[in-house]
Image (cartoon, helix red, strand yellow):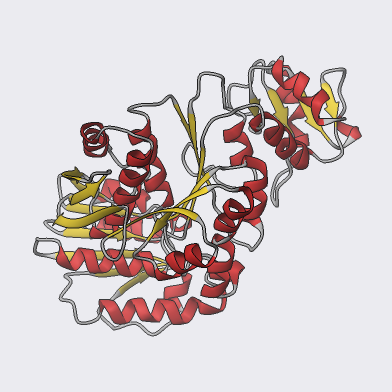
Amino acid sequence: MSVKALYDIFQRSEGVTTDSRHDIHGKLFFALRGERYDGHAFVRQSLEKGCYRAVIDDERYAADERTVKVDNVLSSLQALAAYHRKRFDIPVIAITGSNGKTTTKELMRDVLGRLFRTLATEGNLNNHIGVPLTLLRLRKEHEIAVIEMGANHIGEIDLLCRIARPDHGLITNIGRAHLEGFGSLQGVFRAKGELFRYLKSTGGKAFVNNDQDLLSDLARELELDAIYYGSSGYCNVRGRLTEDGPGTGLEVAAGNPPSVYNVKSSLAGSYNFENILAAVCVGDHFKVPPDQIINAVGEYIPGNNRSQIMQTARNRILLDAYNANPDSMRSALLNFTLQPGENKSVILGDMLELGRYEEEEHMEIVRLINGHNYREVILVGSAFSRIPLPKDYIHFENTGLLIEWLAKNPVRDRFVLLKGSRGIGLERCLPLL
């Protein structure tokens, strides 16, 4: 089936879905395959629940005229999204990076939303499936789009760019995330840099973090049409950290001629300085008034277990369990040491997808913890179990065992850092803290 014919079907539907558990009435259901599932098994159920059509690539699951046969379901979803994207003449901003891309995306969404009807990636739908699903939510009322792009292998960002066709782009930073897939820090740089290379090939504009030498050097090497932000060197938008705890405050100089103003966020941690400044830079470029930028950043409330300080009945918690890699873990620990407060404890989960760097990086985190007078050091995950730990450190193989221990050994009157990869699920122990 041609993409045009599939698009005709899409236009008669009420949107697309890949999950039959949700409300799918009137929607186009794509029967995707994964490592542990096959959407074809839910075709009949989806039709019974009222989906408009089911897109399949295995004829054995053809039920009636409501099943649409294609060569490959995933490729068809991506082609449909690319075809839909071409129908919109609006700015599309792609954002990627090793750390902070979801927070930066949400800040950008809120800043731009003060002036434009903005479409933005929901949650972390940032991969080869999530980006098409986001693009297919574009409607005629949208005036700008912010598309988050994630990757764990070289070539993925380039693929997502060819689907989304961004004309603006931002790379938050280059760090040691997904080393198992990228192989090395240089592999991460090469993969994330695909966004800048795409923008160069299409005449797009880049927002460049001037505090990241790898990124600023690449932008200048490619002779990108670039807008620079940072705390040093030549910057179109310059920032200075003025407050670090419990929120994050910045003094910003932006505009032409430049105006100076202060921005305050509830985000915990000085490592959010670059995320906030990136959103300010994008807002300034798109002519969002400074007072609206200040309000948007100030009213932003982080979700998904990211950079939040919360007070429970028992303890004060710095919750940052959305994700973890060596760089974000170091930043979180450094920030935690600078936060005011006594009786500090840390609960850290494994950093996943590090491949051959796993042991080395987890040992480095243990070395960073050593020397700090934490009341408790609790480590969770199999990677921490494979390295030598001080005798007074507490270790659990998984979060379930930690929960059992906390139920019998309540932690009270502490300031607790909770940080780990999403797959460890440390947020599950919050009710006991």
Residue 229 position within the rendered picture, expressed as x and y whole percent measured from the top left: 33, 55
Residue 45 position within the rendered picture, expressed as x and y whole percent measured from the top left: 72, 24
Residue at 31% in and 82% down: 367
- Left or right of 40: which side holds 409? left
Give the mark count: 0
Image position of 407 with respect to 215: above or below: above
Q: In which quadrant of the rendered image does the N terminus lie?
A: top right
Image position of 266 with respect to 18: above or below: below
Residue 379 position within the rendered picture, expressed as x and y whole percent measured from the top left: 35, 69
Residue 249 position within the rendered picture, expressed as x and y whole percent measured from the top left: 17, 50
Image position of 73 with respect to 200: above or below: above
In this view of the protein, can residue 51 be seen by the observer? Answer: no
In this view of the protein, can residue 87 be seen by the observer? Answer: yes
Image position of 377 with respect to 64: above or below: below
- Left or right of 10: which side holds 278? left
Using the rendered view, name the quadrant where residue 200 is placed. Answer: bottom right
**Nearer to the camera, 422 or 406:** 422
- Left or right of 356: which side holds 120? left
**Nearer to the camera, 420 or 116:** 116
**Nearer to the camera, 202 or 348:** 202
Residue at 18% in and 57% down: 241
**Nearer to the camera, 365 or 408:** 365
Residue at 71% in and 39% down: 78
- Left or right of 66: which side holds 60? right
Residue at 34% in and 34% down: 287
Report the residue that reaches farthest toward the front.
257
